[in-house]
Amino acid sequence: MLTLIILVLAGSAIYGGWRLWHKPAAKNEATSTNSAQTKTADQYLVVKQWGVKFKLSGDINDATYTPKDSLTIYVSAAKLRAVRGCENANILEIQRGKANDFIGPSKVSEIIANNPNSLTKLGDYYYALVAAPNSCAATDDSQGRAMLNQIRDNFTQAIKTVERSD
């Protein structure tokens, strides 16, 4: 009887973990789908939460975003999701912060002092693209890695065009 109870509890825990693991992915897809509607006819990605927009070009004309927190959004595009291994990855982030905040692992004031061209300033905020250290593209997929690099470059250029949307 005790063995049966332990098996039922273990099975419930495994099922609960599986449900939790898959639940955020479904939420992100819904948010990404809804955020696609924030793109205007002029090919801008409008981030309503921040009151800004980014001009889109090249391989990211269909860009979408999913909010992560008040200073970070995940960004994606169809061509990124088409790269083998990147189908559901949240690897590209646009982060914003004030001088005393962090973008990636570095304090904004340090980035300003050491590499100011990697940031774009609008109002009190600095914006930058942050990519996950481990790429989603398969190591044996040179074409996928090249596409991923092109998409990173396109998002980096989009950040340089940030302007108020209100």
Image: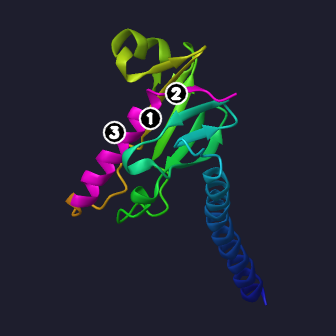
The stretch in magenta equals 143-166
* Quadrant (top left/top right/bottom left/bottom right) for the N terminus: bottom right
Residue 113, by quadrant, is top left
Amino acid under disc 3: Asp
- Determine whether the residue tagged by mark 3 lies in a helix, strand or loop: helix
Distance from Cα at disc 3 to Cα at disc 1: 9 Å
Residue at 37%, 46% in the rendered image: 58
Identify the residue position indicated by label 3 in the image. 153
Left or right: 92 in relation to 26? left
Q: Is residue 39 above or below residue 83?
A: above
Q: Is residue 25 above or below residue 7?
A: above
Identify the residue position indicated by label 2 in the image. 162
| Residue 79, disc | none
Identify the residue position indicated by label 1 in the image. 158
The location of residue 102, given as percent across then percent down, is: 52, 23
Distance from Cα at disc 2 to Cα at disc 1: 7 Å
Tell me if residue 26 is in the magenta stretch.
Answer: no
Residue at 41%, 17% in the rendered image: 111
The reply to whether residue 139 is visible in this rendering is no
Label 3 or label 2, whichever lies nearer to me, is 2
Amino acid under disc 1: Ala
The reply to whether residue 84 is visible in this rendering is yes
Q: Is residue 40 above or below residue 121?
A: below
The location of residue 91, given as percent across then percent down, is: 45, 48
Q: Are marks 2 and 1 in contact (CB under 8 Å)?
A: yes
- Determine whether the residue tagged by mark 1 lies in a helix, strand or loop: helix
